Amino acid sequence: MRPAFSVIFLTTLIGAGQGLFLALFTAESYAAFDLLPAIAPGFLAAGSLLALLLLITGLGASFFHLGHPERAWRSAAQWRTSWLSREVIALPAFSAIVALYGLVHFSGANPTLGMLPSGAPIKVSAVLGSLGTLLAFLLFICTAMIYACLRFLREWHTPLTVINYTLLGGASGFTLAAALAAQLAPERTGFFAGWAVIITLMGLVGRGASLVRNRRLKPRSTLQTAIGIKHPRIVQKTQGAMGGSFNTREFFHGKSVFFLRRIQWIVVTCVFLVPAVLLAAGVWGSGIAVLAQAFAIQYLGLLAERWLFFAQANHPQNLYYQAVP
Amino acid sequence: MTQLALVIDLNVCVGCSACVTSCKEWNTSSAAGPLCDGNPYGAEPTGTFFNRVQTFEVGTYPATETVHFPKSCMHCEDPPCVPVCPTGASYKRKSDGIVLVDYDKCIGCKYCSWACPYGAREFDEAGKVMKKCTLCVDRIYDKGLPEKERKPACVRACPAGARLFGDVHDPDSEVSQAIREQGGYALMPEWGTQPANHYLPRRKTQLHIHEDELERSDNPLLIDSELPQPGTGEPSLDDVTSW
Ligand code: SF4
Ligand code: SF4
């Protein structure tokens, strides 16, 4: 497939936004159960604002993918069958919860709604946070299932797609939370950086597994099944177009195998290895500069990762276009 | 239930692309708006088509065969392109099984084209919506046309008669009989899309002539070249020649 930059930005930006929100609420939950000292509401409010900005920027990027952005409202219609439609509903719903969550912490109006049997208070922010967590995971599932549900795009049609979207969004979000904490709540930096290292390494395992899987995939469709002629030697002579067509543009990335392999190493280095080292330094007390670098490198790496995700998907329609590189 | 479809006979198709041009002509003039072209008179012309003919060479020279292969939307019975559409612009008609795009609802997200394994959908770069074969839905029901013209433009244009059109769910239809009796098959059956369009395979047309057929068995002398020569005085058949 030809990677579309609008979709690359959409998925990486909202992924980081979702991960950042999950990081914030994780820290608040730890505090609610007295596993951590209470966390400054100002930090949570600032984090929510940042997450919201990421979500809105991602949503904005997605409009560049549409031929008719003015009709985008129609895309919520088919939620019964279309994961894209479900994503279109889940994204604003999640953003609204993030906004409310941030507002509660910003205003300080966080009343207690009841008590847990253990005696811990149930705050409004905890209810919003739980709802947001649920929606964040739902959104990861919707985004990934858009690709994973296409059964003949076999590079995508695997549970690893959902797992990796979740892990990589989580990793970049926790990394960003660590960088933010280094600035606004330095005593929490280690907590976020620690989790970020763990999720980043889990992401390495998940994405590594999908890269290995991609390499081993045997195509199920062949030129023989595509045109229904069972002869081992078939050569295409014409493709039905002189100057190319939608089919020769949309489904080919146009880069060499060599280029893809190089991108693969950039991904492994920039998304996983370098950030893991920088984050580990964060756990031992490095400041904002190192952690901001960790996030920047990881995010740039994720852009390459998403590019590779699209480029590696081999569409069966390409069998009808044997002469496109 | 009706399922309209095309049956394309690869044994007959000569690759003339008459179906491609007549399709383009009919559909670019339709009420649904033109099928836009890009750079039509330049070096690299491109454009939106519902139907294209490709050519494949099968085998190793000199034992090769040239196969011309027209391809358009298969109007799958279980079309993967339909459920993924977020707007409902892509739909399959219950009444006749045609898969259509509502160009007024389509947001141009291209998701359906990713979900079609056959590459049958083309994005119109000028209209910014997804387009595909409609089986000439605007002519096959047109009461203003004489009955025999109510067929897709490609079917009417094919000079070789390689394209059949009809209801593949009606066992007595011309298309069902052709599929049944001439080994009609569907493309990429491995994905379970159940394409309604079918292809008829290449067939070897062979004539066996046995030796006894080379000579007339009722020839009393068993020699065709040397016919009995009557005498010149014998009565002739036409009173002109002696024989
Ligand atoms: S051929 Fe493609 S566009 Fe046509 S119905 Fe099947 S999946 Fe949909
Ligand atoms: S491009 Fe149009 S028809 Fe295709 S999935 Fe998007 S909205 Fe539906």
Image: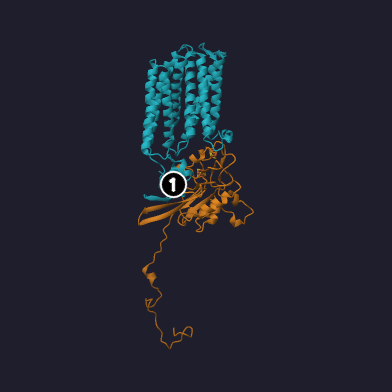
Chain colours: A cyan, B orange
Q: Position of residue B160 (x, y in %)?
A: 50, 58
Residue sitting nearer the eye, B115 or B21? B21
Furthest residue toward right: B144
User: Label 1 marks which chain's residue?
Assistant: A
Residue drawn 45% across and 53% down?
B68
From the image, tell me which residue sits under label 1.
A320
As shown in the figure, which amino acid type bears the numbered disc 1? Answer: Tyr
Q: Is residue B226 visible?
A: yes
Q: Is residue A147 above or below residue A279?
A: below
Residue drawn 43% across and 28% down?
A300
Numbered label tally: 1
Residue A296 occupies quadrant:
top left
Furthest residue toward front: B42
Residue drawn 47% across and 23% down?
A19
Task: Please identify the quadrant where the C terminus of chain B is shown.
Answer: bottom left
Q: Position of residue A210 (x, y in %)?
A: 39, 32
Q: Is residue A154 above or below residue A203?
A: below
Q: Position of residue B95 (x, y in %)?
A: 59, 46
Q: Is residue A293 above or below residue A312?
A: above
Disc 1 on helix, strand or loop? helix
Q: Position of residue A160 (x, y in %)?
A: 42, 31
Residue A204 occupies quadrant:
top left
Residue sitting nearer the eye, A50 or B143? A50
Q: Establish whether ligand 1 lies closer than 8 Å to the Cβ of label 1.
A: no
